[in-house]
Image (cartoon, grey):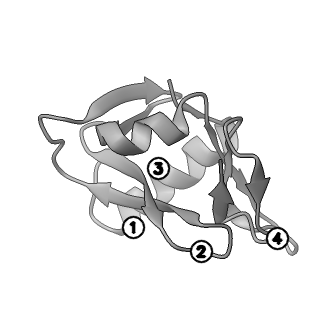
Amino acid sequence: MIKVSDTASKRVALLMEDEGFDVAKDYVRVGVKSGGCSGLSYDLKFDHDSGEEDKIFVDNGVTIAVDKKSFLYLVGTTLEFEGGLNGKGFQFNNPNANRTCGCGESFSL
């Protein structure tokens, strides 16, 4: 399961609308790719479709699509959003990460 905090849910809805997506029927695609200063980095984008191999989760009004490989790294993760003057934007609270970089955009297991 991948969860979405209240603040992240609100921000996702606003951004999806700005980019021509509908939070009620489109997806937030979350993934993991090689790279970043800690070895793996998070990938977050909007998508109109899901794939046959995707795992689909709905939390806090947001539908998340995750490919099977990325899901292994993201089980139990919560998508959060920190705004304000010192806010960092979207953050992944990943209980599987042993180490994260200072910006929170990459991690290692």
Q: Are marks 1 and 2 in contact (CB under 8 Å)?
A: no
Q: CA distance from mark 4 to mark 2?
A: 11 Å
Callout 3 environment at 10 Å: few (<14), some (14 to 19), or many (20+)? some
First of labels 4, 2 by sequence position: 2
Q: CA distance from mark 1 to mark 3?
A: 9 Å
Q: Are marks 1 and 3 in contact (CB under 8 Å)?
A: no
Tell me if 20 is positioned left or right of 94 in this view: left
First of labels 4, 3 by sequence position: 3
Q: Which residue is mark 1?
A: 18
Q: CA distance from mark 2 to mark 3?
A: 27 Å
Q: Secondary structure at mark 2?
A: loop
Q: Which residue is mark 4?
A: 102
The image shows residue 75, relative to residue 25, as above or below, that is above
Camera-nearest residue between 18 and 94:
94
* Mark 4: amino acid: Gly
The residue mark sitting in front, 1 or 4, is 4
First of labels 1, 4 by sequence position: 1
Q: Which residue is mark 2?
A: 36
Camera-nearest residue between 47 and 39:
39
The answer to whether residue 23 is visible is no
Q: Which residue is mark 3?
A: 13
Q: Secondary structure at mark 4?
A: loop
The image shows residue 101, relative to residue 50, as above or below, that is below
Callout 4 environment at 10 Å: few (<14), some (14 to 19), or many (20+)? few
Residue 3: x and y in percent read 57, 30
Residue 77: x and y in percent read 61, 36
Q: Secondary structure at mark 1?
A: helix
First of labels 1, 3 by sequence position: 3
